[in-house]
Image (tube, rainbow, N blue to C red):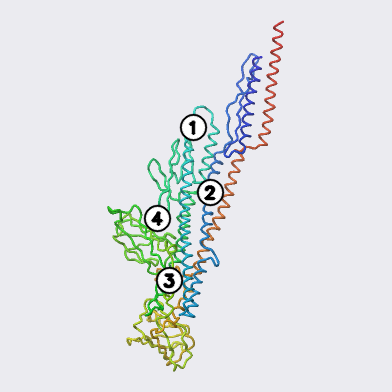
Amino acid sequence: MAGLLSLGARAMFANQAALQTIGQNIANANTPGYSRQSVVLTTSAGQFTGAGFFGKGVDVKTVERSHNDFLTKEAAATKATASADSTRADQLSRMEKLFPPGTDGLGYAASQFLNAMVDVASRPSDPSARQVALGRANELAVRFSNAGQQVNDLQAGVVSDLKANVSIVNQLAQQIANVNDQISKTRGTGHTPNDLLDQREQLISQLSEHIAVTTLPADDDTVGVFIGGGQRLVLGAQASTLQVSPDSYDSLRAVVSLNESGQIRPLDESVLTGGSISALLQFQNKDLQDAKNMLGQLASAIGTRVNEQNALGLDLSNPPGKGAQIFNVAIPRVLPAASNARNPDGSFTTGVAASIVDATQLQASSYKLTSSVAGNYQLTRLSDGLVRTVNDGDTVDGFKLSFTPAAPNAGESFLIEPVGAAAVEMRRVLDNPNGIAAASPLTAAASVDNKGTLTVDSIYAVNQNFDATKAPITLAFGDPDPNNANNLQYTLTLADGSVLNGVWSAGQPIGNQPAAGIDLGFEFRSNGVPRTGDVVTLAPTAYTSTNNGNAKAFLNIQSEGLVGRQTLPDGSVTAGSTINDAYAASMSDVGARVQSANYLSGVSTAVASDAETTRSGQAGVNLDEEASRLMQYQQAYQAAAKVLQTAQSLFDELMKIAQR
């Protein structure tokens, strides 16, 4: 009877354990990270008798969880990628608002300002027309300034998000270390702490949303967690911490570093292959900087060109003077590395200054100046990685370098942003409407004795080569050009008696032909056709209130390729983009990034969802399956109870027989 009773009791215990485990699965069917558990049953070794081996029932070996290490790691890795893509897509969508199309765009505001100069050209002495032009200038400046401020706001938001993510990562890392410690203490029991293992995997999965990790199991059943190509975040029961600190060049930007036992190691976003922290760093260091430089390139080109043209004309002051600046154009920023050598008072012993030489050749990029050995300086254009060797006084991409107060030492570096602050610092600085220089410094008058149909269209200064002391200038047309009978030879007789010769063709301006040896800094344009002997007198402007020559020059700025010109190795200069084309190109660039990021986010999210579905399909709880197993073990439990009942009945009957 004892054998039968033991069999029944062991069977009831085994089935009760199975039912308890099934109940645990059902209770945690919707718990994130829970892995289905099952009881492992083994047959007890049989007992030998003279009649053979008789079974001793069933043993509960252990409780194991359904788990696939590969699928678990794959789900965490794809989650890190999806989180990075989603974070970057969200940030780019915010940045896209800096480049609105249509009437809200910067290109439209620039066109409105230049179009307002049409009224000034029509009524150069009308205060209302001038005031409207200043109002349009202010609107343009405000739009640039607001866009630049929004870039700064986005940067501040990135730093705030980085700090929040780093705080979460540090908390999760410490929790993983704590769970590692609890798991290691169970070593030697012969059984796995399933709930602790689930908890650790869930924590690692959550950690992957913020930063991509790799894991490595240890002999004591703990798991090491590594980031950034092998940097230790968690090892055993010890957790390192991440920290956010100011960039070594720009304090407004942030870097993420690993603090490992007091040793600080900056983490480059290129080695952080996933997670929201990686995406935020990439957005800050690439996308946001590109947007700031694109805005700054436009602001610098427009502001400088308008200021230059206004300075070439005459205003309505008494006596007339050169036009004042209309816009404030920020000087290039040069940011020394925090590690550069310093004086005892904290100032840097060496330095670099930059100044704008030609705003039309400024590129939408930042630059890094490094010195590997004393006297050897390399300038890297960060937008495309172009490296050039430079020296003190060199001009590169429209800006000039100056080493002051001393040339950089070996190992020192500087971040140069020629246009980085141009947008946020752009503002209208001209408040007096009379300061708009609508008048040209020269006035052209055709002789009444001319035989041809030539009439004056416009005349205005185009560069700083213009010298008013060379006027009055007499333009006389001579014989037809021997090489082309449709063209006429002409002579320019300056006030000092010097004579310049050239050849006129239809539509060609006179006065600014460097290739022909005529570089007087002004352009005279005419309508009609002159004849031999016709004369035009170019004299200093006497009545600025009725002259609109320089105002007409403003109208040409809109169609001028003044943005992003480049000097080629052969010395030639590429044609730049117009204001509207440059702004459209910036919108297109940002739009392409947004579209690409949204597509990648959709794909990676789908991949992560599939990976999690595959993992949970093996490790998750299926309620239908658990219900079936519940009935199975319920019946087995009832059968085991029947065995005990039978053994009890036999034992009672035996006792009755013994009492007789």
Q: Residues within 10 Å of mark 3 (few under 14, many from 20)?
A: few
Q: CA gap, disc 3 to disc 4?
A: 34 Å
Q: Amino acid at mark 4?
A: Asp
**Residue 180 vertical placement versus 487 (above, below):** above
Q: Closer to the N terminus: mark 2 or mark 3?
A: 2
Q: CA gap, disc 4 to disc 1?
A: 43 Å
* SS at circle 2: helix
- Which residue is under mark 4? 250
* SS at circle 1: helix
Q: CA gap, disc 2 to disc 3?
A: 50 Å
Residue at (47, 68) in percent of width and height: 138
Q: Closer to the N terminus: mark 3 or mark 4?
A: 4
Q: Amino acid at mark 3?
A: Asp
Q: Which mark is residue 431?
A: 3
Q: Residues within 10 Å of mark 4 (few under 14, many from 20)?
A: some
432 or 292: nearer the eye? 432
Q: Quadrant of residue 536?
A: bottom left
**Residue 297 vertical placement versus 489 (above, below):** above
* SS at circle 4: loop
Query: Depth-wise, is mark 3 or mark 4 nearer the camera?
Result: 3
- Which residue is under mark 2? 83
Asked whether disc 3 touches disc 4, contact meaning CB atoms under 8 Å apart, the reply is no
Residue at (57, 55) in percent of width and height: 599
User: Measured from the top left, where is residue 89 in percent x and y?
Assistant: 53, 54
